[in-house]
């Protein structure tokens, strides 16, 4: 039940990001649900492999390269989904940061 609630809150966070940033568009709540699911899967399955592969550059940049990885995954999700669009890398950077912040705040209200 908690997982479903977090998924819904992540979709709401994605809608808020799309509302605040003109370079990110979400067609509908259904598209936001699918995008939140894809982002969650990318972050849980693909991101650990990418973090491991880019560990040297992450160490050299003192962890700042993780922001680039988050942005690339956010941008990739926007490029493969029909109702979710990210218009460029810098919008992906800002969108990924804002999405992480908002979804973290919303997830904090969910009881464990």
Image (cartoon, rainbow, N blue to C red):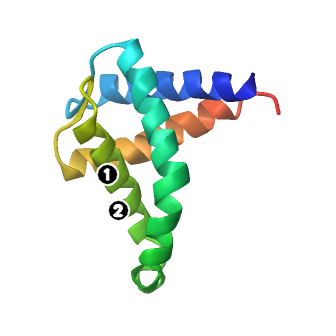
Classify 10 Å Cα crowding around label 1: few (below 14), some (14-19), many (20 and above): many
For the view shown, which residue lies furthest in the left direction? 87
Which quadrant holds residue 98?
A: top left
Residue 48: % across, % down = 53, 63
Residue 72 as seen in the image, left or right of residue 99: left
Q: Quadrant of the C terminus?
A: top right
Image position, residue 16 (x, y; %)? 41, 24
Are discs 2 and 1 less than 8 Å apart at CB? yes
Name the residue: 81% across, 28% down.
111
Above or below — where is 36 with respect to 61? above
Report the Cα–Cα distance between label 2 and label 1: 7 Å
Residue at image position (31%, 51%) is 93
Label 1 sits on residue: 93
State whether residue 32 is above or below residue 61.
above
In the image: residue 13, left or right of residue 19: right
Q: Residues within 10 Å of mark 2 (few under 14, many from 20)?
A: some
**Residue most extreme to the right:** 112
Residue 11 locus on image (x, y percent): 48, 24
Label 2, on which residue? Answer: 68
Residue 56 in the image: state x and y as whole percent. Answer: 44, 85
Q: In which quadrant of the rendered image does the N terminus lie?
A: top right
Dot 2 or dot 1, earlier in sequence: 2
Q: Along the line of sight, which residue is nearer the eye, 36 or 23?
A: 36
In the picture, the disc for residue 37 is: none
């Amino acid at each position: 039940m908690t997982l479903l609630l977090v998924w819904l809150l992540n979709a709401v966070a994605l809608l808020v990001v799309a509302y605040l940033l003109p370079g990110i568009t979400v067609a509908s709540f259904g598209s936001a649900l699918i995008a939140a699911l894809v982002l969650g899967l990318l972050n849980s399955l693909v991101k650990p492999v990418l973090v491991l592969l880019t560990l040297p550059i992450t160490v050299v940049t003192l962890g700042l390269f993780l922001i680039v990885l988050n942005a690339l995954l956010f941008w990739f999700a926007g490029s493969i989904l029909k109702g979710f669009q990210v218009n460029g890398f810098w919008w992906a950077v800002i969108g990924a940061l804002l999405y992480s912040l908002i979804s973290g705040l919303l997830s904090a209200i969910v009881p464990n």
